[in-house]
Image: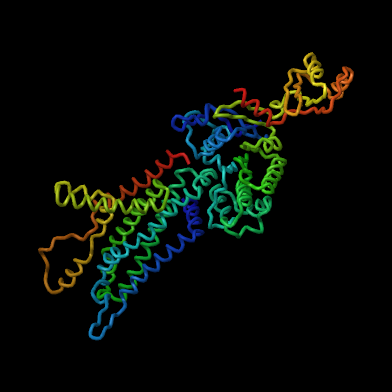
Amino acid sequence: MKRLFLIEFHKLKNNRAAKVLSLIYFILFSAIALFASIRFNFGSIDFRLADQGIFNFPYIWHFNAYIVAFLKLFLAVVIVSMVSSEYTNRTLKQNLIDGLSKKEFILSKFYGVLGFALASTLLLFIVSLILGLIFSDYNEVGIIFSDLEYIFAYFLKLIGFFSMCLFFGILLRRSAFALGFLFLLWIFEGIVQLFVKFQAESLEFIVNFLPLQSMGNLIIEPFSRLGIIKSAATQLNSEFEKSYDVEWSAILIVMAWSFIFIFSSWKLLQKRDL
Amino acid sequence: MKTILKLKGLTKKFGSLTAVNALSFNIQKGNVYGILGPNGSGKSTTLGMVLNVVNPTSGSFEWFDGNMTTHNALKKVGAIIESPNFYPSMSAEDNLKLVCKIKEVDSSKIDHVLDIVNLKDRKKDHFKSYSLGMKQRLAIASALLNDPEILILDEPTNGLDPQGIHQIREIIKRIAADGMTILLASHLLDEVEKVCSHVIVIRNGVKLYAGPVDELNATHGFFELKSEDKEALKQLLDTHEAIESYDEEENDLIKAILSQPYEAKALNKECFENQILLTHLVKRKETLEEQFLKLTKNQ
């Protein structure tokens, strides 16, 4: 495992595009945090996002995990290109000739995906922890480290999404096609959802099995929850029923998708003549 | 003698086209093999199959007596297929480091192999800044990193300028002289003739010949003759015991093929005694190219 990871790391380390995009990703990541702590002061308006309660423990885990997940698109580009460039440069062929098996090749790419997901998750944890410690109204250790399942959900969301990118890269061999296909899938899922909502409500369970939707289901939007938290101090909200928890079903579905994507990448590569 | 590679009825079909048809041959340690064949005869497909990048339709192959998986066997092989494939934005050194990681060998040999191909002073430069000749030399360096049991070269001089071709040939000759087993695929016959001890000739995916170069060349040669008295010369050749047949070529040249060893001196003497004055007399052996053309034409 270490050997395969080092092989992939060596490739990424020496790839300028991957380095630049990863750097932009991690800078944007931190920039979001900084942006939230800026105090806007226009005459009579004195506004600071950080004072709106978004950085309160444990809500901050949920909020940050949801927001920074949008940035995963940057890394998706890196992952798609790190697969498709192996085709266009014919280095995949050379890797195999040099003695890497097709299985090892896919595994090394998967370890790369794992590395990116782990690094992002770690950064999310650290940035959120720091922001929380600065701005949170609650600082008890028990509260700080509650609701950490959102961090895990974020990690899984990235694994699922990157595995999908990996598969598209292997399937289509060109970055532009793979990213275009991702976009098409997004539109397709949107159409399916609309159709189910207005035409076939009995099929609603299917929507949760769509790859992108299932990844979205991991972390429910946190905005409506913010109001509740603010008002919770004044009144007990008993009739509100929406669950913001990370559902086991969503976890299992995303895990299954990740496995399917990686496994099919391997099978696809095995069947192909290069 | 140790067998390095064994092909048993290896076949590859692309749709209705049979690119390689039930190919069987053995590669023994210590020999230099040439795979000969015109473009599109299935050379690269054959190499692709034994190198794990093309899936065989049927048949099998065995590396080193078949007691290890193909990808592990390939760690002991050095191979270059078609164009040199490396990561363009990596330096030569970093590219070779990656190959070391894949082959699981120590990276201490990098400087040594770069020295063999005269690229040591360019090792920090990006691969994309290299000329084709340098890229091809880097590919050879990369193939030598693991002290391979066999070196496989597919069209190593394709697309190179005369100087590049010369450099690559010199490198191959030097490596061959060190006793390394080499498998060289090429459609350039003089290339094969210069370095190979054995040849495998294939056409349309079918094996036509496999064996030592000498045996492919095992004729007694031929005479090129010219005389002003052509009819008399032909008459003499008709009845001559050592002449199997003759052809008239351009410029009144007559090519007489020998059926047994015969000296040019003796033939010259006989002609003179029969009052035929030769204006041209050369005894030659057929080149590999002529042999090859004959072999591929007859089938």
Q: Quadrant of residue A145?
A: bottom left
> Which residue lies at the image location 34% right of the left edge and 54% below the top edge?
A161
Q: Position of residue B284 (x, y in %)?
A: 77, 28
Q: Which colouring convention does the figure follow? A: rainbow
User: Can you see residue B30?
Assistant: no
Q: In the figure, is residue B208 to the left or right of A121?
A: right
In the image, B280 versus A32, the foreground residue is B280
**Does residue B145 lie above or below B234 as drawn?**
below
In the image, A56 versus A263, the foreground residue is A263
Q: In the figure, is residue B106 to the left or right of B12?
A: right
User: Outermost residue toward the bottom?
Assistant: A43
**Does residue A154 lie above or below A84 as drawn?**
below
> Which residue lies at the image location 41% right of the left edge and 53% below the top edge?
A175
User: Outermost residue toward the left?
Assistant: A239
**Does residue A30 lie above or below A152 as drawn?**
below
Quadrant where the N terminus of chain B sits is top right
In the image, A93 versus A220, the foreground residue is A93
> Which residue lies at the image location 82% right of the left edge and 24% below the top edge?
B227
**Does residue B238 lie above or below B30 as drawn?**
above
User: Can you see residue B230?
Assistant: yes
Q: Position of residue A63 (x, y in %)?
A: 27, 66
Q: In the figure, is residue A71 to the left or right of B195?
A: left
Q: In the figure, is residue A84 to the left or right of B226?
A: left
> Which residue lies at the image location 39% right of the left edge and 57% below the top edge?
A77
Q: Position of residue A272 (x, y in %)?
A: 44, 40
Quadrant where the C terminus of chain B sits is top right
Q: Position of residue A162 (x, y in %)?
A: 36, 54
Q: Quadrant of residue B218?
A: top right
